Image (cartoon, rainbow, N blue to C red):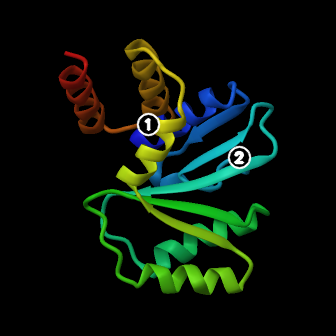
């Protein structure tokens, strides 16, 4: 949810000319409009600008290859993989990036805190009401579980006090 929110902040900083879509974890690629976990399009829905995967659990090389192949099938050649503190990669990330570069595919791995720092430094000011609205939008898009919704509520309550 936080990565989708960060892309929304990026879109706001871009004058609202970007459309951010997040997708249910187990149904990515279910439609032609779903490429990665989070897809960022021009405001009119075309072309695809950014594809991102957000992970906060262990992931493997087959996970990365599957995500990259979905992006390539959609005719895109860039994927940002944003990983949280609970993510553990069962591979040497720099070697995987170099291998994909040789194929002409731009694969980037970035920690969630580093990604957040970069986006927030460029984002416009937003109100808490806007933040809550954006989080609720992506909770609905991803058909989040009750546990996730409750966690988001608790975090918002702590931060907004």
Tell me the residue at 50%/57% (across/down): 53
Which residue is drawn at the image coordinates 56% and 77% (left, top)? 65
Is disc 1 in contact with disc 2, using a CB cutoff of under 8 Å? no
Q: Residue furthest front?
A: 121
Q: Position of residue 137 (x, y in %)?
A: 49, 26
Quadrant of image for the N terminus: top left
**Mark 1 vs 2, N-terminal side:** 2
On the picture, is 30 further left or further right than 138? right
Pointer 1 local density, CA inside 10 Å: few below 14, some 14–19, many at least 20: some
Which residue was labeled with disc 1? 143
Q: Which residue is drawn at 59% across and 84% down?
A: 98
Q: Distance between the residues labelled 1 and 2?
A: 17 Å
Q: What element carries label 2?
A: loop
In the picture, measured across the screen, residue 157 lies left or right of residue 141, that is left
> What x and y, as percent, mark residue 107?
59, 70
For the image shown, how many numbered marks are present on the structure?
A: 2
Residue 99 coordinates in the image, percent (x, y): 60, 87
Residue at disc 1, secondary structure: loop
Measured as percent of width and height from the top left, residue 79 is found at 61, 63
Residue 98 left/right relative to 84:
right
How many neighbours does mark 2 have within 10 angstroms: few (below 14), some (14-19), or many (20 or more)? Answer: some
Which numbered marker is on residue 6?
Answer: none
Q: Name the residue under label 2.
A: 33
Q: Residue at x 72, y 83 (%)?
A: 103
Q: In this view, does 101 lie to the left or right of 125?
A: right
In the image, residue 81 above or below residue 144 = below
Establish if 136 lies above or below 97: above
- The C terminus is located in which quarter? top left
Question: Which quadrant of the figure has residue 20?
Answer: top right
Q: Is residue 1 visible?
A: no
Q: 124 or 93: which is nearer to us?
A: 124
Tell me, yes or no, if residue 88 can be seen here.
Answer: yes
């Amino acid at each position: 949810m936080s990565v989708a929110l960060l892309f929304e902040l990026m879109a706001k900083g871009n004058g609202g000319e970007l459309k951010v879509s997040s997708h249910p974890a187990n149904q990515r690629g279910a439609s032609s409009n779903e490429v990665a976990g989070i897809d960022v399009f021009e405001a009119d829905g075309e072309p695809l600008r950014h594809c991102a995967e957000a992970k906060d659990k262990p992931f493997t090389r087959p996970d990365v290859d599957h995500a990259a192949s979905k992006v390539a099938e959609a005719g895109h050649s860039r994927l940002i993989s944003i990983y949280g503190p609970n993510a553990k990669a069962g591979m040497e990330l720099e070697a995987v990036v170099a291998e994909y570069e040789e194929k002409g595919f731009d694969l980037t791995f970035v920690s969630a805190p580093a990604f957040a720092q970069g986006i927030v430094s460029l984002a416009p000011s937003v109100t808490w009401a806007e933040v809550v609205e954006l989080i609720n939008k992506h909770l609905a898009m991803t058909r989040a579980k009750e546990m996730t919704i409750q966690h988001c509520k608790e975090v918002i309550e702590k931060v907004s006090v």
